[in-house]
Amino acid sequence: MGKVVFLYRSLAYRNAAADILRKARKLPRGAERSAARRYARALRDLARTEAWLEGRIAREPRTARRMTSVASG
């Protein structure tokens, strides 16, 4: 059940980001367009963060790798 909820939530964030980005493209250049683009980027990043928190993307932090290599050498 958790995977299904994750999928719907992630898709909802991505679809909302795409919709806002489409609307932002129609706006004239300016503060309102920039704000809409920032909002769309934040929703896209939120979907990625949700995927990371759910364990879909496994990445080791660079600092931990660097500290391990320094300690062993």
Image: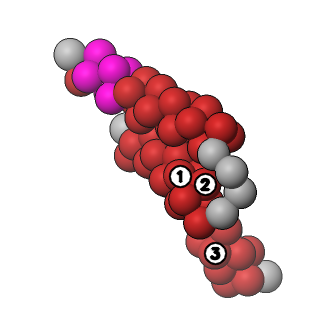
Q: Residue at x 26, y 22 (%)?
A: 5
Q: Position of residue 19 (x, y in %)?
A: 51, 30
- Whether residue 53 is situated above or below residue 61 in the rendered picture: above
Nearest the eye: 28 or 53: 28
List the single residue furthest toward the front: 28
Contact (Cβ within 8 Å) of mark 1 with mark 3: no
- Whether residue 70 is situated above or below residue 3 in the rendered picture: below
Nearest the eye: 20 or 72: 20
Q: Which residue is mark 3?
A: 63
Q: Residue at x 37, y 21 (%)?
A: 7
Q: Which residue is mark 1?
A: 36
How has the structure been colored for display? secondary structure
Q: CA distance from mark 1 to mark 2?
A: 5 Å
Q: CA distance from mark 3 to mark 2?
A: 36 Å
Q: Which residue is mark 2?
A: 33
Q: Amino acid at mark 1?
A: Ala
Q: Is residue 53 magenta?
A: no
Nearest the eye: 25 or 19: 25
Nearest the eye: 24 or 43: 24
Secondary structure type for disc 2: helix
Q: Residue at x 79, y 82 (%)?
A: 73
Report the span colored magenta. Answer: 3-9
Contact (Cβ within 8 Å) of mark 1 with mark 2: yes
